[in-house]
Amino acid sequence: MRILPKPHMAQLLISVQNVHEAAIALECGVDIIDLKDPNTGALGALTLSEIESIIHFIGSRKQTSATIGDIPMVPHLIKERVVQLQKFPLNFIKIGFFDAADYQACLDELQKFTSSRQQLIAVLFAELQYPEDLLKKIKQAGFSGVMLDTMHKNGKTYLAYYSVTAFENFVNNVLANDLLFGLAGSLQLSHVNAVKKVNLHFMGFRGGVCIKNQRQSKLDCQKIYNIKYALQEELQALNS
């Protein structure tokens, strides 16, 4: 993935938990298939065997990402999981930046992995307050991008924690540091229009594309199609 000049269409990222859901995501034409277990936390990790099965099924047909899981900011714990995921031909590895007094030790450890074929994505949580210089340090450590997500899956989105101005300022800071920017966290179809003025590189969905908007439920292909169509419409509107 590369930074694109405006206007461009945000890539659609859909989280799946097994081969069956990966097949649905492929059928619906998503851009990035994200491997995650919605039953085990905000960034719940799938087992290595499940990841292997899904990756084998997808092959090179789509970009893929996976999360290391809800792991505290302890360098050796994060390193262990990243090493495990590097064995797979993933495009992106997502690492949650949970609450910590200092992130530098983890960034120093992760910098050793940023030259690999997988791009590292720092997942920041809307509920947390981060040091002002963290985005700069994330870039210096060699990360490719930042994703703003929600830690508590209670239906609240980034809008519960950011004003429109604060959100736009955050996005501008991400882009000013030459990082990709993605948005996730209880997003639904209506949020496509809400962020149309923001230079998003990807939007991530799980609950918003599931039956009854329950992230543990089955994927609803029609909801995925609706969001993909809405993203295309927004691009056409920007170009008109």
Image (tube, helix red, strand yellow):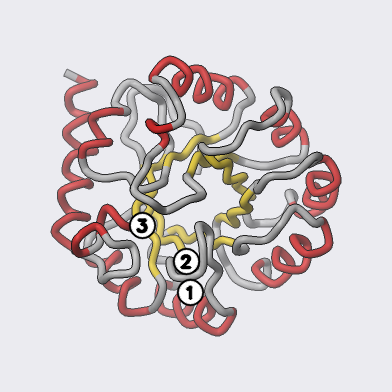
Seen as rendered, the residue at the extreme front is: 154
- Residue 237: x percent and y percent? 17, 23
**Closest to the observer, 49 or 70:** 70
Q: Earlier in the sequence, mark 3 or mark 1?
A: 3
Residues tagged 3 and 2 counted as in contact (Cβ below 8 A): no
Give the vertical position of 121 relative to 137 (above or below): below
Badge number at residue 55: 1
Label 2, label 1: how many angstroms apart (C-alpha)? 9 Å
Q: Secondary structure at mark 2?
A: strand
Q: Amino acid at mark 3?
A: Ile
Label 3, label 1: how many angstroms apart (C-alpha)? 15 Å
State how many labels appear: 3
Frontmost of labels 2 and 1 is 2
Q: Secondary structure at mark 3?
A: strand
* Residue at x 44%, y 72% (from the top left corner): 59
Q: Secondary structure at mark 1?
A: helix
Q: Amino acid at mark 2?
A: Leu
Q: Quadrant of residue 24?
A: bottom left
Q: Is residue 157 left or right of residue 68?
A: left
Mark 3 highlights which residue? 14
* Residue at x 53%, y 23% (from the top left corner): 170
Q: Earlier in the sequence, mark 2 or mark 1?
A: 2
Give the vertical position of 213 relative to 102 (above or below): below
Q: Is residue 147 left or right of residue 73?
A: left
Badge number at residue 35: 2
Residues tagged 2 and 1 counted as in contact (Cβ below 8 A): yes
